[in-house]
Amino acid sequence: MYFSTGGAADGTGQAAAYEAGKLVGIIPLTTTTTGAYFERNLGEWDNKSGRDKIVFTHDNTTNGVGHRCKDIGKALAEAANAGPHVDGMTDVVDLDTNVFIGNLSFITGVAVTLDA
Amino acid sequence: MENYLYFAEADVETGGDSASEAITVPASSYLFADPLSTTVTNFYFKSVLGSDYGMQKVALTHTASKNKEVIKGVLACVNAHPSKGGFIIVANSNAAALTTGTEYNSVFNGLGLSTVAITQDETGGLHTTNIAGVSGGTALYNSYGAGALSTEVAPQYRRQVKGTEVITEILVDLTGLANKGDAANDVIGLAAGGAAYIGKYVAATTGVIYKAEIVCLEVPGQGTATITTDIDVNFNASAVLAYDGAAGTSELNTGGFAAIGASASAMNTAGAIAANNYIYLVEGDTAGTTGVYNAGKLLIKLYGTLASF
């Protein structure tokens, strides 16, 4: 699963790609942000407790259709279960090219935090 | 293929590191079920935030004595054949979402599912990531007043539960806060005003506090006018004390912070640190004169024990 912040993906933290099986959960952070967490396992010596975090910025729909964390959870579940195609990489949110999986076009920002 | 399970509380607005109000987790994160009472069954999942945070707990409230049926229903969701992308709404109590409302999986039909509560079950080690505080809050231990908001960083919190032992940590930055200097035990906070408490003694989460410590991580620095480096900690029933407010005798008298690592501690021998007290930084002397800090980081550690017998 590939994410980019719109910063041209040519510097650390401007994009990230994770194996689908590393996705450990999605939770709302504020009314307009949702976090997706990925296991950060640096090797056999690592305790597997580390996390990388992708924070999505979006509109506030908490009193309408409900918090966007539900839409994002659904889209990431679909991305995680997508059959490998072309090169096996699924663009989830790529703000460099404005490519979104599913209905995630409501996302206006992506931030990558390594070792969150 | 993997199923992803969705749970939501009645009002989904925020979450973050201390109180998620909704969660999507892979089915493989499922750990176990625990029937808490006749009407509540707890389900545990691996922590989203990392194992240092313990486990993610989802409590489902249901018709009395339907625990086994509810457990069977959740496991049916865990093991359902992935379809429609593998995203399964297990229990969505989000009534505040006006156009969708509550959604409970059909496996719970007839079981009276009514409430979803999502919490971190903190059985692991100390949080390695700081927990954000709640500005203006008065319910949680990690509440702070607007008058305690440093211009550098807001108060941060960490918490560890080991058995019945609880260690609560409050990290406070002094930058931008001020001392008046006309009397000892007056509150340190923003000169502009606003309640300046930095935390709250909430026995349900902090445990019964029997000891308090403070450690200097960065020596308090003088920005404008004259500051004091003698800073004490006061536990007070009032939630509205602000800059220059008289807090009375302090429970943790430090003697001041002239160097990194300087520390002080106090046992709660007389019970002066009382449940529901708000925690304030106060002037330990009268050395300051309308001073504003431009540096200074303090760590307050509260030791408590859970009263669960």
Image: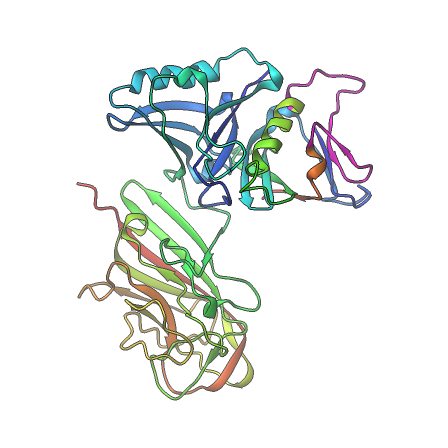
**Image height of B141 relative to A9, above or below:** below
Q: Is residue A3 left or right of residue B133?
A: right
x, y percentage for residue B145?
43, 65
x then y, percent, for residue B45: 44, 28
Task: Using residue A40 as the reference point, say whether residue B307 is left or right of it.
Answer: left
Out of B111 and B28, give the one closest to the viewer: B111
Residue at the image position 40 percent from the left and 28 percent from the top: B44
Whether residue A11 is visible here, answered yes or no, is yes
Residue A11, quarter of picture: top right
Seen from the viewer's position, the closer of residues B104 and A116 is B104
B247 part of magenta stretch: no
- Image coordinates for residue B39, horizontal then vertical, percent: 27, 27
Q: Quadrant of the N terminus of chain B?
A: top right
Image quadrant where one finds the C terminus of chain B: top left
Residue range of the region highlighted in magenta in the rendering = A80-103
Q: Give residue B186's quadrant in the image.
A: bottom left
Residue nearer the viewer, A76 or A21: A76
Identify the image quadrant of residue B189: bottom left
B170 shown above or below B85: below
Q: Is residue B201 left or right of residue B221?
A: left
- Position of residue B14 relative to residue B221, above or below, is above
Q: Position of residue B98 (x, y in %)?
A: 51, 37
User: Quick check: can you spot residue A40?
Assistant: no
